[in-house]
Amino acid sequence: MVIETFVRQERRRQGLDFKELSLHSKVEPELLERMEIDAAQVPLEAVNSVLRALGYQLGIVRDFRPWDADYHPHSIEALPETETLSL
């Protein structure tokens, strides 16, 4: 799941509109709208603030696939198949 989708779904699940989430996260409503369209175009600090306001945090997860014998780090097959948040 991408961050844009996660933020939109979680905001709606918690019953928050852009203005309310803006107050909790201290991120401008316009920036929140942009984040729900394309989080890669929003500063990471703003993404972190919004996630914290929703009760989450951004983190790094180790991909253990490099230990597989047939792993090639630069191939598309090297991407994890698990559902993770991404920018």
Image (cartoon, rainbow, N blue to C red):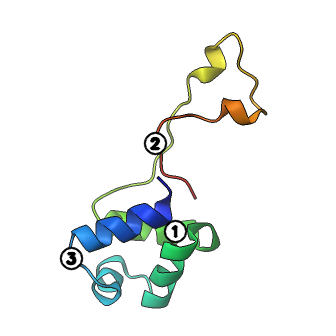
Mark 1 residue type: Glu
Mark 2 residue type: Glu
Q: Is residue 28 left or right of residue 40?
A: left
Q: Earlier in the sequence, mark 3 or mark 2?
A: 3
As helix, strand or loop, the secondary structure at mark 1 comes to: helix
The residue indicated by pointer 3 is 15
The residue indicated by pointer 1 is 45
Spot occupied by residue 38 in the image (x, y as percentages of width and height): 58, 71
Spot occupied by residue 60 in the image (x, y as percentages of width and height): 51, 42
Measure how far apart labels 1 and 3 are at the Cα level: 23 Å
Measure how far apart labels 2 and 1 are at the Cα level: 23 Å
Q: Is residue 12 left or right of residue 84?
A: left
Q: Earlier in the sequence, mark 1 or mark 3?
A: 3
**Along the line of sight, which residue is nearer the eye, 61 or 80?**
80
Q: Residue 20, located in which quarter of the rendered image?
A: bottom left
Spot occupied by residue 28 in the image (x, y as percentages of width and height): 45, 88
Q: Is residue 2 left or right of residue 76?
A: left
The residue most toward the left is: 15
| Residue lying at 38% horizontally and 55% vertically, measured from the top left | 57
| Residue lying at 49% horizontally and 37% vertically, measured from the top left | 61
Callout 3–callout 2 Cβ contact below 8 Å: no
Which dot, 1 or 3, sits closer to the camera? 3
Callout 2–callout 1 Cβ contact below 8 Å: no
| Residue lying at 25% horizontally and 79% vertically, measured from the top left | 16
**Along the line of sight, which residue is nearer the eye, 47 or 8?**
8
Which dot, 2 or 1, sits closer to the camera? 2
Q: Earlier in the sequence, mark 2 or mark 1?
A: 1
Classify 37 as above or below 66.
Answer: below
The numbered disc on residue 16 is none
Classify 72 as above or below 83.
Answer: above
Mark 3 residue type: Gly
The residue indicated by pointer 2 is 83
